[in-house]
Image (spheres, rainbow, N blue to C red):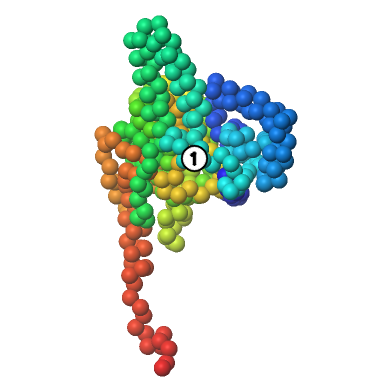
Amino acid sequence: MEQRSHPDNDSEMDPQLTTIQPGGGVVMSMELAWGKIRRFYLATFFPGYVKRMAETRQGKRGSLPFEPIDPRDLKFYRNQNTYWWADSDDPFTWRDRLPFVRAGLAELFVMGGGFSLLAVAGAWAWPPLALPPIVLVGLIAWFFRDPNRDIPTELGTVVSPADGKLVQIEKIEDPELGPCIQFGIFLSIFNVHANRASLPGRVVAVRYRPGKFLNALRPESARENENLDIVLVDQDDIRTDHAARKFRIRQITGQFARRIVCWVRPGDVLNRGEMYGMIKLGSRTELILPEEDSLEIIAKIGDKISAGSTTLARYRSVVQNTKAIVNAPESNDPESNDES
């Protein structure tokens, strides 16, 4: 992972967020336990590797609860101001090229592996018994997949932060952002659960709130369920006569989705459509945009949408102002021309 930006003075990191998965979980506990075993094994039998990784390690330990050996040890601490390795020094970047969300690889291995063993046992006892666990293995692989996305590049284009069904487009009064349009997206267990940035932006706040695990289709789930907010400053906004446009993306747990993952921290800059987290196993995602005359809503309730590629809305003034600047005629003032 390349060097992270330092938080700005106007940035806010929730002190509750000591890991990228604040709700913990059985698989996370298993991974952390395995990490202790792996570090002991490497330190005992591969001191040369340990020394080499320590020499390429950058940053300071900070609040990290242990001394890491390689980038795998930082999986759950990517949102902390701690050690980091440049991509060129990270021997595990190949995992980012797998067709699955890297944050869910352990669940894919543990859950998929467990059901695979049940399928083998079922096939040995009575072949038809193998069918249900095989189906579950397929569903788990389908859930954690990470398909390629064609991300729009036009300035001012607002893409969906999640896959799923658009169930809400509503005017609200946000206590921080003022009059806004809120988009609510329901994610079923059949949707990709990776979250992506709707606009290119600099993260200025990350906030976490513990809560309930109501069905994500129920309206009160948005208020009462565990959720995590990131607030970003829109990097597409070229206006100079207004305060910087901020927007919010909220990850909300569901009845079965108990694990929010978010690995960004204040100061990080995300590109449009860049993945920054996920919600594991069915949930809701909300996008809150400032309401402006230039905001044109493209999507409609009931649409099936894809994170990073489906256009929800567009800030027309950004596009028009940019085109006006690019296509502006050269000055005809004779005094501005060089004399021959």
Q: Which residue is mark 1?
A: 96
> Residue visible at 32% across and 55% down?
316
Question: Can you see residue 187?
Answer: no
Q: Residues within 10 Å of mark 1 (few under 14, many from 20)?
A: few
- As rendered, which of 153 and 135 lies closer to the eye? 135
Secondary structure beneath dot 1 equals helix
- Indicate the quadrant where residue 331 lies: bottom left
**Quadrant housing the N terminus:** top right
- Indicate the quadrant where residue 266 lies: top right
| Residue 42 drawn above or below residue 10 | above
Q: Is residue 281 left or right of residue 22?
A: left
Identify which amino acid the numbered label 1 is placed on.
Answer: Asp
- As rendered, which of 132 and 248 lies closer to the eye? 132
Q: Position of residue 289 (x, y in %)?
A: 39, 45
- As rendered, which of 233 and 47 lies closer to the eye? 47
> Residue visible at 44% across and 45% down?
274
Q: Is residue 22 left or right of residue 188?
A: right
Q: Position of residue 56 (x, y in %)?
A: 67, 46
> Residue visible at 45% across and 30% down?
279
**Quadrant housing the C terminus:** bottom left
| Residue 335 drawn above or below residue 166 | below
Q: Position of residue 255 (x, y in %)?
A: 41, 21
Q: Is residue 210 left or right of residue 33?
A: left
> Residue visible at 36% across and 35% down?
163
